[in-house]
């Protein structure tokens, strides 16, 4: 009985109470006690997130350091990863503002520009693959939009109208799609939070005899139904 309380009901109660206090402090800001409790909870969450990030970084160093020490296949990539990570971490720890500025200007800035430049080839390859694999009406539309966006970004003579059409594509259809994605993500986050607060979703609780919580889990097709119990 005690194991069930500590493994199941205590985590569920802690998550529900914490979520209700945070929501109450957000929707009822004039209640001073709820606002103070919400501020404390957010501070705790930031501290836990910082330690989780630190543990993740240490785990990266441990895993890739072991690969380098053992000489496993692909160890040069691990070495490059660790060197790049150190180049970003060390200047942030040291009290040298000039070094931080140079790292961001001469390392992170060019890397970001290189990633944006690679987007050109990624879009072209994606368009070619869609035309080759999926013979549908969406494929030519995607290819035309990609060409308009790419050509509208180049300083070609007489392409002012193309740049204007590109801006319209980004501001109207592109922004509509982005807002739809953001709304979907927000609704998904709200639904997940409500399920955790109500105890329907229990990723933080161990349930004796029912580790999956009776929920459907995806399985490999042909090996099972994906239902527990």
Image: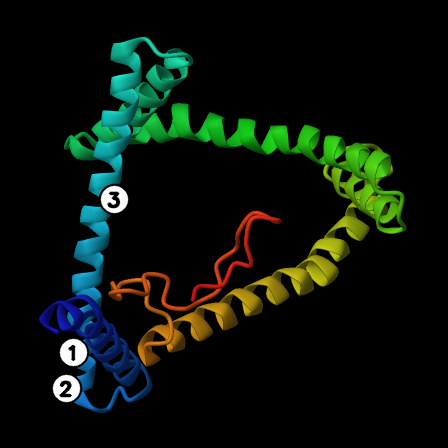
- Residue 98 visible in the current orientation: no
Q: Secondary structure at mark 1?
A: helix
Judging by the rendered image, the residue that carries numbered circle 2 is 33
CA separation in Å, label 2 and label 1: 6 Å
Q: Circles 2 and 1: CB distance less than 8 Å? A: yes
Q: Position of residue 54 (x, y in %)?
A: 21, 41
Q: Residue at x 24, y 91 (%)?
A: 30
**Vertical arrangement, residue 220 with respect to residue 74, above or below:** below
Graded by Cα atoms within 10 Å as few (under 14), some (14 to 19) or many (20 or more), the crowding at tag 3 reads few
Q: Residue at x 41, y 17 (%)?
A: 77
- Residue 129 visible in the current orientation: yes
State the quadrant of the C terminus.
Answer: bottom left
Judging by the rendered image, the residue that carries numbered circle 1 is 37
Q: Residue at x 41, y 12 (%)?
A: 73
Graded by Cα atoms within 10 Å as few (under 14), some (14 to 19) or many (20 or more), the crowding at tag 2 reads some
CA separation in Å, label 1 and label 3: 24 Å
Graded by Cα atoms within 10 Å as few (under 14), some (14 to 19) or many (20 or more), the crowding at tag 1 reads some
Q: Position of residue 136 (x, y in %)?
A: 88, 48
Give the left or right position of residue 141, taking residue 14 as reference: right
**Vertical arrangement, residue 12 with respect to residue 67, above or below:** below
Give the label, 3 or 2, closer to the camera.
3
**Vertical arrangement, residue 33 with respect to residue 229, above or below:** below
Asked whether 203 or 117 is in front, the reply is 203
Q: Which mark is residue 89?
A: none
Q: Position of residue 171 (x, y in %)?
A: 69, 59
Q: Secondary structure at mark 2?
A: helix
Q: Position of residue 154 (x, y in %)?
A: 74, 34
Q: Residue at x 78, y 34 (%)?
A: 129
CA separation in Å, label 3 and label 2: 30 Å
State the colouring used for the structure image: rainbow
Judging by the rendered image, the residue that carries numbered circle 3 is 53
């Amino acid at each position: 009985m005690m194991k069930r309380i500590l493994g199941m009901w205590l985590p569920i109660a802690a998550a529900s109470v914490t979520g209700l206090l945070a929501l109450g402090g957000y929707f009822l800001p004039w209640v001073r006690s709820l606002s103070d409790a919400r501020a404390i909870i957010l501070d705790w969450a930031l501290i836990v997130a910082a330690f989780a990030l630190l543990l993740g970084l240490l785990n990266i160093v441990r895993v890739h350091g072991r690969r380098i020490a053992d000489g496993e296949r692909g160890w040069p990539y691990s070495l490059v990863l660790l060197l790049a990570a150190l180049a970003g971490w060390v200047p942030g720890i040291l009290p040298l503002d000039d070094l931080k500025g140079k790292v961001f200007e001469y390392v992170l800035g060019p890397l970001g520009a290189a990633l944006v430049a690679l987007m050109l080839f990624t879009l072209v390859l994606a368009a070619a693959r869609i035309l080759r694999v999926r013979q549908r009406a969406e494929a030519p539309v995607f290819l035309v939009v990609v060409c308009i966006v790419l050509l509208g970004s180049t300083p070609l003579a007489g392409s002012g109208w193309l740049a204007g059409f590109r801006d319209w594509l980004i501001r109207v259809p592109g922004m509509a799609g982005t807002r739809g994605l953001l709304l979907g993500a927000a609704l998904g986050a709200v639904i997940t939070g409500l399920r955790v607060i109500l105890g329907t979703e229990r990723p933080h609780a161990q349930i004796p005899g029912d580790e999956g919580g009776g929920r459907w889990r995806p399985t490999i097709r042909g090996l099972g139904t994906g239902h527990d119990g």
